[in-house]
Image (cartoon, coloured by chain):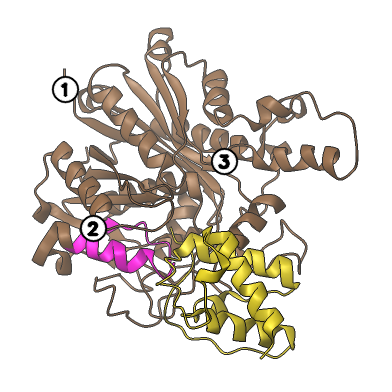
Chain colours: A brown, B yellow
């Protein structure tokens, strides 16, 4: 059984706002959510900016007893999932709950809780940590709490593949719904990396920009870390039509590959193979692709390598494809990045408006792409790709096709 | 020439690359020593720890030889500001 799979619900929380509407407005108006980091005292890091979720009050979303179990990354997963489910208008039945999968991505899980509790041991010489530390820290907490909240009893798990986590999760969810192993999937990812320990670890990697994120610009200096969560509701096209659901777009394919090359250096061949695999899985000819949401971290090395991979896959057509990196707006949310960018890509197809690459200054001849600089562009692509390439050389690409009611 | 600083840089390189100290000379390029991006950031960590300096990211991007590192460390230890080339990316990337 091979079913076409469509996106019928979207939810997200990010540096661009508390919900999908605010996210999309900021993308279209090119208003980056990047600013001075509040999570760490000034002067304790060599970089000072991040894309934080601001004004988030956990107690406004969760009962105190529930919060005891929820690290910030799991809170983001739940908030995004609630929005996506409400947006989908799904009417839960017992049978549908049994047939719903929850597949989430997260790179580092509950690191804030990890940091807080181990500080008690190592720094304050306490003799015990909070007994709920393990359930807060576990990377599957987001997926598990979504299942618990909505009573969903289908296949539920978390995929961790660094910056490709969400794309791996969404691709897996696509295949499960396509093949009839689930009738609905709630899928996406969440991340909350602004613990002092994780920030110091990124500092030591020397890839974080001292100013802002300028993907594909000649004077780019690195990435800007972000946080948040995003979820998509997937269901078969026929079921969505039968219940009169709003269809945002078709999730047509997913392509995966490994570089087998290096722990951190980007590579042309692996991403190119993942893009080709996504096109093949979707049954899309390269010429149908009219937008690519790039991995586009803004580091010195990623952007030209990604440009070369796109040029290798699309040949002469590459010059005609608008390619933007929305990380310039919502930051690099690591395991949540692919989910936020999937929402951006789906909405780009749905509204016929391509989100821009923000903070763009000057073209880099090494990144010879049309990068939609600083202003959204009204275009109605037939289909789009969303790229994610992770440390460890793990690549996951999603292919979406424009489709509506 | 501050032989101590040269020795400290060469010893740090020897530790990071797991090669004999005598195989490292100031005129060697980092490429000839097969220093990749992760080796480079690990070397900067070792030097910051052993020399008690803070090495700016843009200084890392400008180095090509062992001599460049030694001179960069000398300027940092002297408290002088350092110039940097925007070329030769030498950091880990994603």
Q: Nearer the viewer, residue A354 or A241?
A: A354
User: In which quarter of the view is residue A30 placed?
Assistant: bottom left
Q: Is residue A343 left or right of residue A290?
A: right
Q: CA distance from mark 3 to mark 2?
A: 30 Å
Which of pointers 3 and 2 lies earlier in the amino acid sequence? 3
Screen quadrant of the N terminus of chain A: top left
* Count of numbered tags: 3
Residue occupying image coordinates x 38% and y 13%: A96
Magenta-highlighted residues: A291-311
Q: Which residue was labeled with disc 3?
A: A108
Q: In the rendered structure, are the residues bearing label 3 and label 2 in contact, judged by CB atoms less than 8 Å apart?
A: no
Confirm whether residue A197 shows in the render: yes
**Percent x, y of residue A107:** 51, 41
To which residue does mark 1 refer?
Answer: A2
Query: In this view of the protein, which residue sits in the foreground, A4 or A105?
Result: A105
Frontmost of labels 3 and 1 is 3
Residue drawn at the location 28% of the way across and 42% of the way down: A257
Residue at the far top: name it.
A95
Q: Are marks 3 and 1 in contact (CB under 8 Å)?
A: no
Circle 1 chain: A
Image location of residue A301, percent across then percent down: 38, 67
Closer to us: mark 3 or mark 2? 3
Question: What is the secondary structure assignment of the residue under circle 1?
Answer: loop
Q: Is residue A358 above or below residue A198?
A: below
């Amino acid at each position: 059984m091979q079913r076409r799979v469509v996106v019928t619900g979207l939810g997200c929380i990010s540096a661009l706002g508390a919900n999908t509407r605010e996210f999309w407005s900021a993308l279209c108006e090119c208003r980056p959510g990047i600013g001075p980091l509040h999570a760490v005292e000034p002067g304790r890091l060599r970089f000072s900016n991040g894309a934080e979720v601001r004004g988030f009050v956990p107690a406004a979303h969760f009962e105190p007893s529930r919060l005891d179990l929820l690290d910030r990354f799991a809170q983001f997963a739940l908030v995004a999932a609630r929005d996506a489910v409400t947006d989908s208008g799904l009417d839960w039945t017992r049978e549908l709950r049994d047939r719903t999968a929850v597949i989430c991505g997260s790179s580092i899980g509950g690191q804030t809780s990890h940091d807080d509790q181990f500080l008690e041991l190592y720094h304050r010489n306490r003799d015990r940590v909070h007994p709920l530390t393990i359930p807060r820290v576990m990377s599957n907490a987001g997926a598990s709490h979504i299942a618990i909240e909505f009573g969903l009893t289908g296949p539920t798990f978390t995929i961790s593949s660094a910056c490709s986590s969400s794309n791996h999760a969404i691709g897996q969810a696509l295949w499960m719904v396509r093949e009839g192993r689930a009738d609905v999937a709630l899928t996406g990812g969440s991340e909350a990396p602004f613990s002092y320990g994780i920030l110091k670890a990124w500092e030591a990697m020397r890839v974080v920009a001292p100013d802002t994120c300028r993907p594909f610009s000649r004077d780019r200096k690195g990435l800007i870390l972000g946080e948040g969560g995003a979820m998509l509701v997937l269901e078969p096209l026929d079921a969505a039509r039968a219940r009169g659901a709003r269809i945002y777009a078709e999730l047509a394919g997913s392509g995966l590959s490994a570089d087998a090359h290096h722990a951190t250096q980007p590579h042309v061949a692996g991403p190119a193979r993942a893009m080709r695999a996504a096109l093949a899985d979707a049954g899309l000819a390269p010429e149908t692709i009219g937008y690519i949401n790039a991995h586009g971290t803004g580091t010195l090395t990623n952007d030209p390598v990604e440009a070369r991979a796109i040029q290798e896959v699309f040949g002469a057509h590459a010059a005609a494809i608008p390619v933007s990196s929305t990380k310039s707006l919502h930051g690099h949310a690591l395991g949540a990045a692919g989910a936020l960018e999937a929402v951006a890509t789906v909405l780009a197809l749905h509204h016929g408006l391509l989100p821009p690459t923000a903070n763009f200054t000057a073209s880099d001849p090494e990144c010879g792409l049309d990068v939609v600089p600083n202003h959204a562009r009204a275009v109605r692509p037939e289909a789009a790709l969303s790229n994610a390439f992770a440390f460890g050389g793990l690549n996951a690409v999603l292919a979406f096709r424009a489709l509506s009611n | 020439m501050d032989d101590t600083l040269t020795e400290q840089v060469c010893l740090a390189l020897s530790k990071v690359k797991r090669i004999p100290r005598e195989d490292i000379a100031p005129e060697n390029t980092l490429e000839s020593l097969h220093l990749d991006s992760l080796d480079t950031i690990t070397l900067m960590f070792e030097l910051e720890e052993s020399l008690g300096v803070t090495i700016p990211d843009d200084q890392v991007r400008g180095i090509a030889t062992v001599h460049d590192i030694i001179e960069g460390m000398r300027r940092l230890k002297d408290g002088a500001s350092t110039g940097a080339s925007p070329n030769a990316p030498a950091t880990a990337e994603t």
